[in-house]
Amino acid sequence: MAGSASKALLALKVIFYLVVIAGVALWAYGLYETRGEWSYRIAGAPEASYTPPYTLHVAVPLQVYDPAGPVTAKLVYYEVYINGYPAGEGLIPYINLEKGWNNMTISVDIDLSRASCGLAHALASNENITIRVKGYAMVDIKTFGGLTFKTITVPFDKVAKNVAAPKLGSPASDLLKIYDAICSNPQILGRLTEALAHLQQGGGISLP
């Protein structure tokens, strides 16, 4: 009798552990399968503010939909483009996300004194601009014990059109107009490129 009781108790323990393991596995697998249901949206009008002499701060309010429940995004990497031209990149570490929509802000500080030709043209025109944010979040999916079961990568790529052009003051506005004028003239741009290369080699500038 005692042996039968011990075997029955052991069998119940095995069944219990198998049920717990199966439950945890199904829960973790369910979280893993929700990776395709994550979504992003721009939650409001992006803002572009100018700080003299040459800094342009761009902030884009973004919302992320988490279908899985409380998780941690251990890293959010993003790139910002203005009218298709690279404007900056950034990182946001360790964001706790709840189930449903969560708020975050994508922001970059642009040094206008180092603006590319495309970026200078986009900002010097004083016309509305298009801002694109793209990147990815690395999200840890954890088990009941807090151990990381899986790290998934959730990409995003969103565009905001007809964003009001930032109001730039001097000296940034003047410098961008100069950049734009130079970049629009291939001959001037070519001569400046040659002159800068000559200077880097220790030579002087010979004017035509």
Image (cartoon, rainbow, N blue to C red):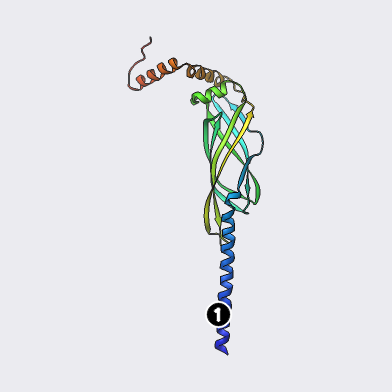
Q: In the orientation shown, which residue stands out farthest toward the top? A: 208
Going 58% across and 90% down the picture, which residue do you hit? 1
Of residues 70 and 37, the one drawn nearer to the viewer in this rendering:
37
How crowded pointer 1 is (Cα within 10 Å; few <14, some 14-19, many 20+) is rated as: few
Looking at the picture, which amino acid does disc 1 mark?
Leu
Going 58% across and 85% down the picture, which residue do you hit? 5
Q: Please state if 126 lies on the left or on the right of 189 as rendered.
A: right
Q: In the picture shown, does residue 24 fall above or below 71?
A: below
Q: In the picture shown, does residue 26 fall above or below 104?
A: below
- Please provide percent x and percent y for residue 198: 35, 19
Q: Check disc 1 and report the residue beneath it.
A: 10
- Please provide percent x and percent y for residue 192: 41, 17
Going 61% across and 22% down the picture, which residue do you hit? 127
- Please provide percent x and percent y for residue 42: 64, 38
Q: Quadrant of the C terminus?
A: top left
Q: In the orientation shown, which residue stands out farthest toward the bottom? A: 1
Q: Please state if 86 lies on the left or on the right of 27 as rendered.
A: left
Q: In the picture shown, does residue 12 fall above or below 127?
A: below
- Please provide percent x and percent y for residue 56: 57, 28
Q: Quadrant of residue 25?
A: bottom right
Secondary element type, mark 1: helix
